[in-house]
Amino acid sequence: MKYLIAGTGGVGGSIAAFLALAGKDVTCIARGEHLKAIQEKGLSLKSGLKGDHLIKMKAYTAEEFEGKADVIFVCVKGYSIESIAQLIKRASHEETIVIPILNVYGTGPRIQQLVPEVTVLDGCIYIVGFVSGPGEITQMGKTYQLVFGAHKGTQVSRELLEAVKNDLIESDIKTVLSDDINKDTYVKWAFISAMALTGAFFDVPMGEVQKPGEVRDLFIGLSTESAELGRRLGVEYDSDPVAYNLSIIDHLAPESTASMQKDLARGGQSEIQGLLFDMVDAAKAHNIEIPTYQRVIQKFNTL
């Protein structure tokens, strides 16, 4: 199958690199100096799971790409979704599937509205990955799990879903084909919201969240409040969501940080709208008390 990675940042670049190392047909969409470096030298991967590699990679801007793809992974930031709608339309054929891998809940249905003629699934990923230089991706630690699936009512071949899953597993990406992608994407949204906001609020890496004390308590408070919102939205948890969030945090590399935290530190555009303000708005709409989120929003409400 032909894979197109729309957005070759920490997440998209890691997916592209792992697929390419396994011999899969992968093309990247990138821009600027990052794209130039990939085109001239290849994609450099520094991986806690794979080691260091320099990988020859087909790479284009969204406007330059003229081919078709069987699977399109959308790995741009939430604020850039509308910008890649035309790419998806041009790059899709009748059986193409689109798999968004974003931090913000509801991305699949949002993209489906933009491209109603294409089959859009949904997905999420647990990874610490970031652009560490032009053409260079760092995948930190041992955590790397991708979850994807179709929303109820989406017609897609089970054989095709299994084929994608098998390609990912052959690429050493731990993969779950979800039977309830609405739940799984909500759980990831709630986790990354708590992780990113805690790190940004205290300006600390995840090693500080792993220690008992004020930082970890903030993370627990955010996780508790988002878990209640999930229950109101009909999410049926397989286990205690707060304990689940803590188990993930405690297995991250201590020096890791969320991409939103990195973006805020650089003074650039970030996903704070989707990870903070959207969560607060949803909680208010369901009359949920969110004192921890309110504490955080007081610090960031001028952004």
Image (cartoon, rainbow, N blue to C red):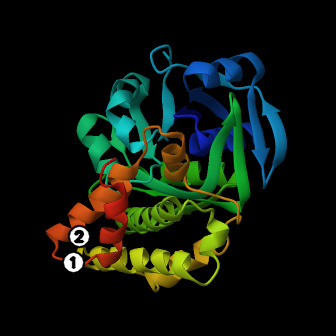
User: Which residue is located at x 49 percent, y 66 percent?
Assistant: 198
Residue 303 vs residue 233, the one in the foreground: 303
Quadrant of the image occupied by residue 172: bottom right
Q: Residue 303, image x and y in percent?
A: 34, 47
**Image position of 135 (left or right of 4):** right
Q: How many dots with numbers?
A: 2
**CA distance separating discs 1 and 2:** 5 Å
Residue type (three-letter) at the residue carrying disc 1: Ile
Q: Residue 38, image x and y in percent?
A: 69, 23
In the picture of the structure, the residue carrying the numbered disc 2 is: 283
Residue 60 vs residue 128, the one in the foreground: 128
Q: Secondary structure at mark 2?
A: helix
**Image position of 37 (left or right of 291):** right
Query: Do we see residue 155 in this rendering?
Result: no
Quadrant (top left/top right/bottom left/bottom right) for the N terminus: top right
Looking at the picture, does residue 63 appear above or below residue 190?
A: above
Residue 148 vs residue 239, the one in the foreground: 239
In the picture of the structure, the residue carrying the numbered disc 1 is: 288
User: Which residue is located at x 30 percent, y 63 percent?
Assistant: 279
Q: Residue 169, image x and y in percent?
A: 67, 55
Residue type (three-letter) at the residue carrying disc 2: Ala
Looking at the picture, does residue 183 appear above or below residue 116?
A: below
Residue 282 vs residue 163, the one in the foreground: 282
Task: State yes or no: discs 1 and 2 in contact (Cβ < 8 Å).
Answer: yes
